[in-house]
Every structure is written in structure tokens, then in C-alpha cells.
Image (tube, grey):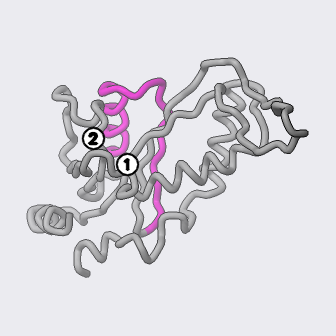
Amino acid sequence: MTRFVNAVVAFSWLPVRLFVQDEARFGLHEAVTRRFITAPGVKPHQLILPRYKYFWLFGATEPATGESFFLEMPALDSDCFQVFINEFARANRESMNVLVIDGAPAHIAGSLVIPDNVVLFRLPPYCPELNPIERVWQDVRKRLLIGLPAGLQALKDDVTRVIANTHQRSWLRSPAIPTSAEYLHI
């Protein structure tokens, strides 16, 4: 990845920023997975909302600064990913943005039109541990386990609140994760 980012720096007239990107699905059919203690042979009752409403949250975060960009979408497909990268490029137009992505089919669709200030870097297959934004989704889900939302809008509000409260948190800034300055050897 260092060689790739260095090549982008060499040919870019804009400052180069490194972002990690991923999506997460949030919905109402999620169990509250807490361990219940019951008498031997008695199966514990567990709350599950029998509804299948959900939404996708697309996110990109710069590990060096914690700056983030999130966009709620109805699906994970190439059309929604196209909208996301267009909005991401518009929000970060003053820099050349290396966007580290996984191999989801929506990311590699032939119909994608990549904006001029975005360069995609694809991670190897089946390696979510290489993408630091996975920690963001774990943190958001952990903070959402407090209660079951009344509906999809309540869940969206809860996710928005958690993201806003953890904006630019240090969950991404860790000695184990190289910053963009380390990738660029600055």
C-alpha cells in the first residue's frame, strides 16, 4: 500500500489523504444478545423484534485525524455506492483522497464512475481485519445494545447520536494502525 500511496502523491497536484471505507447494515431484526441466567433445563426468553426493516450506513474515516464522512443509504449496490463516492468527493474536493475499500460487488461494478479526486485501493479478499473502520461498526453496535428501538426512525436517530458523540474519537488512532503520514513517510 505504501508504494501505491507514494505513486498517488507523486502524480497529484492536491494534498493526499488516506481514508478507509466500509458499510454496515442496521436493522430492527437484531437480538439483544445478553447472557441470561436461568434454572437448569429452562430456556431463557430473549427479546427479538420480528421486523425486517433496515438501512445501510456507508462510512469513510481518515485514521490519521479521525475525520469521518457517513451517509445513510437504502441498499448496498453499485448505485448507492456511486452516490456515496460522489458525495464523499464533493465533501473532500480540496484533496486527493485514497479510499481503501473491500471487495464488495458494489465496489467493483463496471458501471462506477470514479471522481477525479478519489483513487480506490482494494484490500485482499476476506481480510476485514485490515480495515480499521470495522472498529467503528463494532463500537457503534456495542453502544446500541442498551435497548430495543421502537421503530426504524428511532434506530436511525440512535445511530446518528452514537456517531455524533464518537465523531473524531480515538477508536481509529492506535499505534497498531499506521497514519497517512506514516504511509507517506512524512
Instruction: List the single residue furthest toward the front.
Output: 41
Question: In the rendered structure, which segment of residues is drawn in magenta?
Answer: 65-90
Specify few, some or many for label 2: CA neighbours under 10 Å numbering under 14, 14-19, or 20 or more: some
Q: Nearer the viewer, residue 108 or 98?
A: 108
What residue is rendered at 66% in x and 55% in y?
A: 165
From the top left corner, tell me how far across and down residue 7 is, in percent.
11, 64
The amino acid sitting under disc 1 is Gln
Query: Mark 2 = which residue?
Result: 103
From the top left corner, tell me how far across and down residue 183 is, in percent.
26, 72
Residue 33 is left or right of residue 93, and the answer is right
From the top left corner, tell me how far across and down residue 186 is, in percent.
25, 81
Q: N-terminal of the two: label 1 or label 2?
A: 1
What residue is rendered at 67% in x and 46% in y?
A: 161
Query: Mark 1 = which residue?
Result: 21
Instruction: List the single residue furthest toward the bottom.
Output: 186
- In the rendered image, residue 79 lying in the magenta stretch gets the answer yes
What residue is rendered at 35% in x and 26% in y?
A: 77
